[in-house]
Amino acid sequence: MEQKYKDYYGYRILEIIPGFLVWLTFIGVIALSFYKPLAGVYLVIAFYIYFVLRIFYMLIFLITSWFKYRHASQTKWWPYLREHHPSWSEYYHLIFLPTAGEPLEVVDKTFEHLSRTNYNHQKIIVVLAGEERFVEQFKTIAEQIQQKYSKIFYKILITVHPKNINGEIAGKGSNLYHAGHETKKYIDQQAIDYKKIIVSTFDIDTVTHPDYFAYLTNKFISHPNPYRASFQPMAFYHNNVWESDIITRVVANSTTFWLLTDLARSDRLFTFSSHSMSWTALVDIGFWQNNIVTEDSRIFLQGLIHYNGDYQVEPMYIPVSMNTVYVGKFWKSMRNQYKQMQRWAWGVEHFPYMVWHFKKNKKISLKKKITYIWNQTEGIYTWATVPILIFVLGYLPLYLAEKQNVTTVLTQNAPLILENLMRFGMISLFIIALMSVIILPPLPRKFKHGLISKYARFSLMFLQWLIFPITMILLGSVPAIDAQTRLMLGKYLGFWVTEKK
């Protein structure tokens, strides 16, 4: 019993650290601004210089990934696969589609796009995973999907996750955990070789690139050890991008370019949202964790720890597309966007998990442990603090230095220095804005003959990035601070299902 309490309090201390660092930073900057405004000015300028240099450093990875994406998206992977890897036909693709009350139109659209991918659909098994709390609606949808698509795919499995299971968090992770175990029964009955099954997990609104499975199969077969790797595609939020409001578009595109940057940095890359992996590894690690919110990224850490550090995330420079959170009403969409960002920011729960399990696992190299802990800590810390330090608190020491008549040549020129630094930083924003327009899907027919011209709509997609600083704070920093503060206080977050229309 004594050890149990030691473990509890030890883990709680680790949960407190990220939020504590965030609030210590804010309080420290404010205190320094009041008591040593000149020192605060020096600190702010140094921070701005660091931030601008970091932006250009990140821009290198962004451009690297961009060119790889352009090449991958223009290659005909289905003919390439059949020509270069004759063994492709030995593999099955197992696709998990968890649902939680989404309407038939959303589910059907995903199946329709899967049925039009450039692949042999008799090598595809789809698991439609429903929730008992929506069982009547789900059964009706499942029956219609079976009738329409059962002859197209090798098999469509239907699973229903029971509600109110002790120790679980009701959400995507627990649904997938149950679906995984149910699917294993089917795989074992069919005696399909585990090593010949490639698993993909998608949100129910995910639309894959037409060559996604051909590209993934090529990646899997070509990989030196595909049973020790997850495969992470790019995430676009384009399904309803033209219908969405300006704010949800900017936030969604920011996520796309954040992931695009990380794809070129294997030491930072985690699984996120949609991802793929071997069935062998999934069974070995016991499927997705059923008592957390961020199961999509935790699955990588489960593999990393289970295989004693011999596990990685392999980037895939080909996209899957999902919906933005826009649901037709502006303020409801804003609420949904905040909750989505808060849920993603809840990935802070990986920090105590990593430190706790890395400490116990002596077979993972110290360098690898430090790298992942540092990258995770730095990522969640800057997510919460940087926008507010740049656009709000960064000007406080300048203001107070002037009020207290603490003037030097540096303080007098500080506003101009900061302004010029921000102009340099805007270069990367201009490049991202341009890229975001290039990757847009075709303009829907209903918008082509409206009062607003096609060129005006594309111009708006470019100019919308002017509000990026606002979205960075209100829908970036604030939900991240919220999540880390909740974890610090032990106010644990439940799983919130993004509404899809």
Image (cartoon, rainbow, N blue to C red):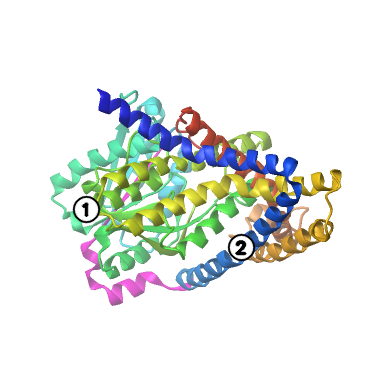
| Residue placed under numbered mark 2 in the picture | 55
**Label 1 with label 2: CB-CB less than 8 Å:** no
- Circle 1: element type: helix
Q: Tell me the residue at 77%/64% (across/down).
A: 420
Q: Amino acid at mark 1?
A: Thr
Task: Tell me residue 490's x, y (percent).
Answer: 46, 28
Q: Which residues are magenta?
A: 74-99
Image position of 414 (left or right of 252): right
Residue 443's image quarter? bottom right
At numbered mark 2, what does the secondary structure look like: helix, strand or loop? helix
- According to the image, label 1 marks what residue? 280
Q: Position of residue 239 (x, y in %)?
A: 54, 51
| In the image, farthest residue toward the bottom | 83
Q: Is residue 59 magenta?
A: no
Q: Is residue 75 magenta?
A: yes
Q: Residue at x 51, y 47 (%)?
A: 380
Q: Is residue 3 above or below residue 201?
A: above
